[in-house]
Image (cartoon, coloured by chain):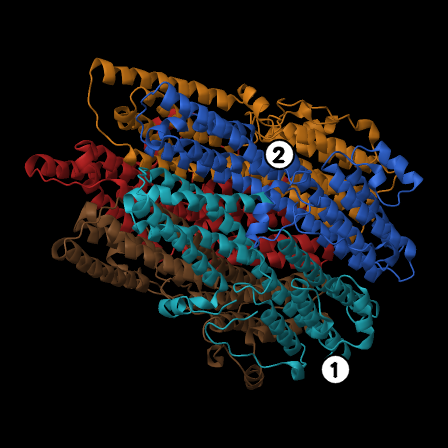
Chain colours: A cyan, B blue, C orange, D red, E brown
Amino acid sequence: MVIYDNKQWFNTLVNFSRSYVIQQLFRSTLMVGIVTAIFCVLVIDVFQFEIRFQSSLFSLLGIVLSILLVFRTNTAYDRWWEGRRLWGGLVNNSRDLALMMHSMLDRGNMEDRNYFAKHIANFAVALKEHLRNGVKLEELYHLDEREIVMYKQRQHIPNQIIASLYERTQHLCRSEAITGFDSIPIRTHLQAFTDILGACERIKRTPIPFSYSIYIKIFIMLYALILPFGLIEEFGYFTIFLEMLLFYAFIGIELMAEEIEDPFGLDCNDLPTGTIATTIKNNVYEILCLYKEVEKEKVRELYEKVF
Amino acid sequence: MVIYDNKQWFNTLVNFSRSYVIQQLFRSTLMVGIVTAIFCVLVIDVFQFEIRFQSSLFSLLGIVLSILLVFRTNTAYDRWWEGRRLWGGLVNNSRDLALMMHSMLDRGNMEDRNYFAKHIANFAVALKEHLRNGVKLEELYHLDEREIVMYKQRQHIPNQIIASLYERTQHLCRSEAITGFDSIPIRTHLQAFTDILGACERIKRTPIPFSYSIYIKIFIMLYALILPFGLIEEFGYFTIFLEMLLFYAFIGIELMAEEIEDPFGLDCNDLPTGTIATTIKNNVYEILCLYKEVEKEKVRELYEKVF
Amino acid sequence: MVIYDNKQWFNTLVNFSRSYVIQQLFRSTLMVGIVTAIFCVLVIDVFQFEIRFQSSLFSLLGIVLSILLVFRTNTAYDRWWEGRRLWGGLVNNSRDLALMMHSMLDRGNMEDRNYFAKHIANFAVALKEHLRNGVKLEELYHLDEREIVMYKQRQHIPNQIIASLYERTQHLCRSEAITGFDSIPIRTHLQAFTDILGACERIKRTPIPFSYSIYIKIFIMLYALILPFGLIEEFGYFTIFLEMLLFYAFIGIELMAEEIEDPFGLDCNDLPTGTIATTIKNNVYEILCLYKEVEKEKVRELYEKVF
Amino acid sequence: MVIYDNKQWFNTLVNFSRSYVIQQLFRSTLMVGIVTAIFCVLVIDVFQFEIRFQSSLFSLLGIVLSILLVFRTNTAYDRWWEGRRLWGGLVNNSRDLALMMHSMLDRGNMEDRNYFAKHIANFAVALKEHLRNGVKLEELYHLDEREIVMYKQRQHIPNQIIASLYERTQHLCRSEAITGFDSIPIRTHLQAFTDILGACERIKRTPIPFSYSIYIKIFIMLYALILPFGLIEEFGYFTIFLEMLLFYAFIGIELMAEEIEDPFGLDCNDLPTGTIATTIKNNVYEILCLYKEVEKEKVRELYEKVF
Amino acid sequence: MVIYDNKQWFNTLVNFSRSYVIQQLFRSTLMVGIVTAIFCVLVIDVFQFEIRFQSSLFSLLGIVLSILLVFRTNTAYDRWWEGRRLWGGLVNNSRDLALMMHSMLDRGNMEDRNYFAKHIANFAVALKEHLRNGVKLEELYHLDEREIVMYKQRQHIPNQIIASLYERTQHLCRSEAITGFDSIPIRTHLQAFTDILGACERIKRTPIPFSYSIYIKIFIMLYALILPFGLIEEFGYFTIFLEMLLFYAFIGIELMAEEIEDPFGLDCNDLPTGTIATTIKNNVYEILCLYKEVEKEKVRELYEKVF
């Protein structure tokens, strides 16, 4: 994610190149401009064709296309925002679980405190990696030998971390360190971890249906192809500029939608899941009174990229 | 579902034929093109009619139609996405139930572990088939004689599997293997199974109201029929291409909406419920430490179809 | 509800007359066509007026109207779909309550099993009738003398059925047939019955605000009235066809929205609440092992109407 | 709220004057018509200006405006419908709380039955008044001296009623008339009362942001002002009618949105919170077997106003 | 937030200057008007260029842009409204927690009553400041020495306040002042505090993706730039007015969206979180019978700004 201040128009526009997708958009718009320019030269100066189409039907097609693209944008944005909600929910759950454990465990019970803090923090880190390229064990905090061996054998590490939390909770319950009433909200939180995990996997693995993706791509291509025929009679060389502007409008929406559709990667607008995971770690250790582990928050500058 | 990478425009477009609905769309668009071509030849060359309509009103009709089709698309997509959410919820519930049973049951209690793993995995398989052509008993895992007899007598097998899980839970509760507090979240999960089952049945059995379906089909037909009259004066033979493009736009949205409206079948964009059911089985057996039953995940190639 | 297969275009179009609203739509469109024809004859042949309006402003009005009608359709469809969700929720709740009672009650406890099966099934039937013309006692299953007397005295029968279920649950709880922990999910389900009941009443009793209803009706009327003035100059006798097509578009959306706004009646697109109630009865009796009462499911043909 | 039957077009249109906002809409549309008429006379007959604008750009502005107004309508309608859901939720909660108390309290325990019935009924009445002009104590049912004194001292009476319900529940719990398990769903309902109260206050106190309100009002004004310049060349005196129709379209949406934005008042389309409160009272007393207090439901005629 | 009455058109329009964003909108629209005026003078009078473009394609671009801006507005408004819901939820939770504590704690137990009242009230104040510029300790109510020291050491003060509430609850639970059943709803409320806190942070820290922000800004700029070319031939000097109107329409939507996107600041349309925090304090102290601390509510005038 690029950090920015939406009220600073000038700075935002100047820093446009921070967004890969905007760069790519400019490049492809430029290319379309060049092709259209050649087309115009050929039609107007070289062959002097006469094409007498009015642009009204091209308007209709443009409107149909833009209505479709808004549907496309809405679904992509909903995924992105749902992803953000899920990671927000992860923060809330992690914090609340830590708060609850803090109130239930004795101040001196460093072992259990460390156990919960470590596993909650590791869940966030593991989830982040699980949604990118698979979990790298060296990124997890404070793993001991036994855990490394165990995690290596398993296909699904985030599941395994939740399992460890469930087992410890059950253990505390059996040893009467916590009561049955205490176990209710703890289990609710562990269940929320599973739900968040599953929902993130769902978003990652299910893009918009294949047919829609092809359908829209073909539509944009064809439209960009025929539009100059509709413009050239009326606008002459100005066609180049208008074609670029319309191409910018349509392809831009599609490209941005593609970028945010899977919000857990390393694209420019993707969610800063790494930063959120660090925040969770700091919060959880602070809440459980394990101050040594709490790092200072980094100060971020405007237009910095965070992932 | 067809697996694809939405950023590879070229590959996606080349593999268009993987989607039946896009194939069908191309076929019907071609047919409309041929008919329009005949119409054009007749009007322009053979009879030399003069039709002097402007296309502005046809634009209005096109816009009205496209607004309607977006409504159509939204409702169909909502079903598809709700179906996906439900199956995602099934994954979450299955995993979480397994995680909880794992923490509650003794490591050595292989009987109960196997019982729960088998029934959770079977529920997903049975649901998948129940939403297609009815449950085939040979697809379920590890059925014994008694179960086969029982399932054959029942009208509704997924219900029966949930009933078995409820009974076993009650049995564990009565024998004090688990406490009353433990039973709360287990029952919540079993209830979620019923809810997911019912919601999937709802989506499958309730398409968009009949009147809307007819209304839209008639509208598209009439529009495709009158459009050439509005185009021919201005565009001549170019009419063929424009008619095809508009027909492509409108019929495409309707066809895709019809395809994803019931997302549990074997259409090209339908949800990979079979694959999800296998994932559930593997996850559940892994969580409950029954490693023998866990199969390796298949590696999927791009543009492969999974169901 | 009319059962249909949305992929069979031909059959669907041939069976259009199964939908009353489509019939009505055709009749009123035809009437408008006749009136417009008379208007055209008068203007073009009899009086030979010259009306030189362009249709662009009429397009604007048409677009404004269609945007409004999509708002109308969305709200009506949301009610219809919410109604469907509620009845789907009723199925889930009834099944799950039956599943839970089945696991909690002894196999031999036929009295309580019958009591719950009967009351759950009767709640669905009573709700269906309550949302139509008021509950007819003869439609309820297995009422005894005492119950008939009691129900006759009450204003609100579905409430009374829930009250009976609550009382029996409390009775089981006091007699320690079920534990306090068991009572939690049972009460959740009974509460869900109340919620579904109330939500259905809400949908039935609160149509779209009166002002919107009038506003849209007036708008459509005025628009249909002035449109021929905008078309006649350009399209001549073709005006009749275009007027009919636009009238079909606008009035169709309004009529269908009116039909599905209250989804619990006996209109053609209304929900098959009767069929759902029968399904609930069969499911509940099967789950509670009262096989004698389970009826065979009827096989439905395409384009049959179910209510 | 005006009661009406949405399928009786003729009766609905004849009774348009029941809606104040439609009356007001007609008055202001008429005024605009008169002003436009004067403008037309001046331009066409008196000064004979020549204004040669085409209406296409005015169409663009109209479309932009109508898209905005749909946003406006959606947000206003969402508030109205959320208000209706909240009051529907109040009905459900009140009923369900009564049903639960009925099953928990002895048949002969008239004191507690009366206490709960009275306070549940009073909460609905107090909420209704709280959302209008502040609670009038004389509208509440069966207040005794002590309660009148107490309520007079408090700023927030609905809060106070919930507090009384909480206290009585706690008292029953301590005296072991109800168990801890019983207290769980009761508290859930009391919490729902607080949530409904707070959500209604939120809707009432937070209209659409001030800037949007001004922005839209200015836009409509300016548009109505310039439109005649765009129409007069093409349509002559017919401009008057078209201006009125467009003004009707745009101002109508805004006026109706303003009316339903705060749905708890006494505007024509506002929710019948008074009637709902009476229904709650009757239901609750019937459920708790206090038949003397149950009033007969009034029969409502079509086009009657209920508040 | 500016308080206003949406039915007083005249007063609302007269007080437009209360909204900074409307002021800014007027300023920038005026500037665009001046630039366009210069352009018109140059083209029409000085150089007498002939630009023969029709405005239809510019309409298409305008429609595409306005559809995009509605997407923009919807997402921004959803954040604003979600923010409002969250603070509404905070009110409900605070009240309900107070109501519950009131019923559970003895009338004479002033210490615990004060403890809960103070911490609930402080949570709202701390959250308000946390979402603006960081918590200022002097704004919190009744902090003692020990608390000031503790809060100064922590990075995240709202978390710390919730931790204190959890600890006190656990303490009451251990000392059997409240039962395990009592602890269930209390913990639910404390969890809701964490959820609200996290959700507000999410809204504040995640604006619309950077690419969308740039994309829209560039689109509006380019559109405003080319529009005069499309208007000047047809409208002459009237171009100035139309350019201003369209610029007003497009830039207005964008500016207002930017303003309400982060609803917790001190912009004119931002939520009155300070006022809500005060309301919470008064309500909570009143409910817990600590009347001395309850302040009189301020009477607000129309068009006053509250934050």
- Name the residue beneath numbered marker 1: A108
Q: Residue furthest left?
A: D46
Q: Is residue D220 visible?
A: yes
Q: Are marks 1 and 2 on the same chain?
A: no
Q: Quadrant of residue D270?
A: top left
Residues packed near mark 2 inside 10 Å, few (<14), some (14 to 19) or many (20 plus)? some
Q: Determine whether A123 is above or below B290 in the image.
A: below
Query: Which quadrant is the N terminus of chain D positioned in?
Result: top left
Q: Is residue C257 left or right of residue E29?
A: right
Residues packed near mark 1 inside 10 Å, few (<14), some (14 to 19) or many (20 plus)? few
Q: Determine whether C9 is above or below A238 in the image.
A: above
| Distance from Cα at disc 1 to Cα at disc 2 | 59 Å
Residue E250 versus residue C192: which sits nearer the camera?
A: E250
Q: Position of residue D71 (x, y in %)?
A: 40, 48
Residue D284 versus residue B121: which sits nearer the camera?
A: B121
Q: Which mark is residue D247?
A: none
- Name the residue beneath numbered marker 2: B206
Q: Nearer the viewer, mark 1 or mark 2?
A: 2
Q: Determine whether E200 is above or below B149 in the image.
A: below
Q: Position of residue D130 (x, y in %)?
A: 44, 53
Give the secondary structure at mark 1. loop
Q: Position of residue B10 (x, y in %)?
A: 56, 51
